[in-house]
Image (cartoon, rainbow, N blue to C red):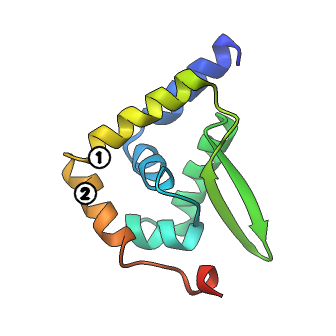
Amino acid sequence: MTLQNETDFFKALGEPLRLRIVALLRQGERCVCDLVAILGASQSTVSRHLSTLRKAGIVQARREGTWMHYSISPQLPSWAHSVLQGIDQLAENHPDLIADFQRLNTTSCSITQE
């Protein structure tokens, strides 16, 4: 990563919805429809934020038919993984993230179950 990439990394995490997306993806790969249902945001909004996270190198995408599945990029340097571990600690006490995790346990797109 270059210094610009590092700056982009932190900028990408500097938006509440993107931080929530990253916290959810730290739990495992999710399709866009799952994220939409959990976050209560429109598909276009979630996709736009995922694009920002992807450009910053934080998430990666995998296509399955017409569906896109996102996960945390395994190519992140160790310092970046350490930062993301801090999000896990934040999630334990933040009301929005706690609610997201509760919805995560009850939401699953029928596409991911096929």
Residue at (43%, 65%) from the top-left corner? Answer: 41
Q: SS for tag 1?
A: helix
Q: Is residue 60 visible?
A: yes
Q: Which residue corresponds to mark 1?
A: 91
Q: Residue 60: horizontal and vertical position, in percent? A: 69, 48
What residue is rendered at 50% in x and 72% in y?
A: 34
Query: Which picture quadrant has residue 15?
Result: top left
Secondary structure at badge 2 equals helix
Observer able to see residue 11: no
The numbered mark, 2 or 1, whose residue comes first in the sequence reads 1
**Label 1 crowding class (10 Å Cα cut-off): few <14, some 14-19, many 20+?**
many
Q: In the rendered image, which quarter is residue 53 located in?
A: top right
Whether pointer 2 and pointer 1 mark residues with C-beta atoms closer than 8 Å, the reply is yes
Amino acid identity at mark 2 = Ile
Q: Is residue 102 left or right of residue 18?
A: left
**Who's the residue at 39% across and 64% down the image?**
39
Which quarter shows the N terminus?
A: top right
Question: Looking at the picture, which amino acid does disc 1 mark?
Answer: Ala
Q: CA distance from mark 2 to mark 1?
A: 6 Å
User: Where residue 69 is drawn, which disc sits there?
Assistant: none
Depth check, front residue: 49 or 88: 88
- Spot occupied by residue 83 in the image (x, y as percentages of width and height): 45, 28
Query: Going by the image, does 57 lie left or right of 11?
Result: right
In which quadrant is the C terminus drawn? bottom right
Q: Which residue is mark 2?
A: 98
* 1 is higher (above) or lower (below) than 50: above
- From the top left corner, tell me how far across and down residue 88 is, in percent: 36, 42
Label 2 CA crowd tier, 10 Å (few <14, some 14–19, many 20+): some
